[in-house]
Image (cartoon, rainbow, N blue to C red):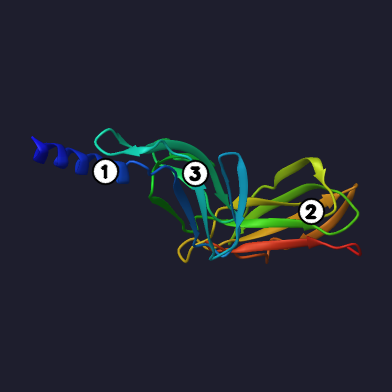
C-alpha cells in the first residue's frame, strides 16, 4: 500500500510540473521587401521588410490529460506587397483565425503576393486622390481613381495593392496624384511608365516644393 501511495505522489508531482504552461506566441516572418502590418489582441505592430516579430498571446492552460491549451485568436495581417488569399472565396482578405497552443510558437510566413504604389506626404498640402491606369502594347486601360477621405495630411501615408506584371504578361502603370485642386505628381503616358513585378513598389513622396 505504501508503495502505491509513493507512486501516486510521484505522479501528482509530475502532473504538477507539466500542468503550468499558459500562453503561447505568434511569430510573423516578413519575407517581402516592404512593411507588413498586423494587429494581435488589439495591439498594432509594423514588421519591416525581411524582418520578424514575435508576439506573446494569451491561451488557455495546458493541463496534462485534461486540456491541450489551444486557443483560437483572430488577427489582422496585411503587407504593402502581401495579402492573405482566401482560396475558398477566391478573394484577398486582411483577417484570419489561427490556433495557438500554450508553450508553443505559431509561425506565419508572409511571402510577396502583389505589387503596390505608396504615397508619403511630406508637404503641408493635402493629398486628395490617386489615379492609375495600366498600359499594354496597343492597349491603354481606363483610369482608376482612389479618393482619400479624409485627405492625407503632412506625415501621413497610404498604399494600394496592384497586380504585378510577369514575363508572359508585360505592361506598365501611369500614376497621378492630386491635392488641393492641383496635380502634385504625374508619371507615364501611353508610351512609357512604371513597370512593377511581384514585390515591387512605386514610392511617391510629395515634398513641400512639389
Which of the two marks, 2 or 3, is nearer to us in this view?
A: 3
- Few, some or many residues within 10 Å of mark 2 (<14, 14–19, 20+): many
Position of the C terminus by quadrant:
bottom right
In the image, taking residue 158 as reference, residue 164 lies left or right, namely left
> Residue 181 location, x and y as percent?
90, 47
Separation of residues labelled 1 and 3 (CA atoms):
27 Å
Mark 1 falls on what kind of element?
helix
| For marks 1 and 3 on the same chain, the one whose residue lies earlier in the sequence | 1
| For marks 2 and 3 on the same chain, the one whose residue lies earlier in the sequence | 3
> Quick one: 172 or 58, which is closer to the camera?
58
- Few, some or many residues within 10 Å of mark 1 (<14, 14–19, 20+): few
The residue positioned farthest toward the front in the image shown: 2
Q: Which residue is denoted by mark 2 in the rendering? A: 177
> Residue 3 location, x and y as percent?
9, 41
Residue 114: image tag = none
Q: Which residue is denoted by mark 1 in the rendering? A: 13
In the image, taking residue 184 as reference, residue 172 lies left or right, namely left
Mark 3 falls on what kind of element?
strand
Residue positioned 21% across, 40% down in the render: 9
Residue positioned 66% across, 47% down in the render: 142
Q: Which residue is denoted by mark 3 in the rendering? A: 57
| For marks 2 and 1 on the same chain, the one whose residue lies earlier in the sequence | 1
Separation of residues labelled 2 and 1 (CA atoms):
68 Å
Q: Are marks 2 and 3 in contact (CB under 8 Å)?
A: no
Amino acid at each position: 500500500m505504501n508503495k502505491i501511495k509513493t507512486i501516486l505522489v510521484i505522479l501528482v508531482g509530475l502532473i504538477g510540473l507539466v500542468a503550468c504552461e499558459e500562453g503561447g506566441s505568434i511569430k510573423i516572418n516578413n519575407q517581402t521587401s516592404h512593411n507588413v502590418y498586423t494587429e494581435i489582441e488589439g495591439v498594432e505592430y509594423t514588421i519591416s521588410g525581411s524582418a520578424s516579430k514575435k508576439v506573446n498571446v494569451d491561451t488557455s492552460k495546458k493541463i496534462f490529460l485534461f486540456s491541450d491549451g489551444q486557443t483560437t485568436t483572430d488577427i489582422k495581417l496585411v503587407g504593402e506587397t502581401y495579402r492573405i488569399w482566401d482560396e475558398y472565396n477566391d478573394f484577398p482578405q486582411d483577417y484570419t483565425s489561427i490556433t495557438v497552443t500554450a508553450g508553443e510558437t505559431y509561425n506565419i510566413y508572409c511571402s510577396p503576393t502583389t505589387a503596390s504604389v505608396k504615397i508619403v506626404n511630406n508637404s503641408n498640402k493635402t493629398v486628395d486622390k490617386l489615379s492609375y491606369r495600366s498600359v499594354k502594347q496597343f492597349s491603354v486601360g481606363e483610369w482608376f481613381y482612389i479618393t482619400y477621405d479624409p485627405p492625407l495630411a503632412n506625415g501621413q501615408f497610404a498604399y494600394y495593392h496592384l497586380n504585378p506584371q510577369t514575363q508572359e504578361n508585360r505592361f506598365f502603370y501611369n500614376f497621378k496624384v492630386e491635392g488641393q485642386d492641383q496635380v502634385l505628381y504625374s508619371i507615364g503616358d501611353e508610351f512609357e511608365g512604371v513597370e512593377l513585378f511581384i514585390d515591387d513598389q512605386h514610392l511617391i513622396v510629395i515634398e513641400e516644393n512639389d
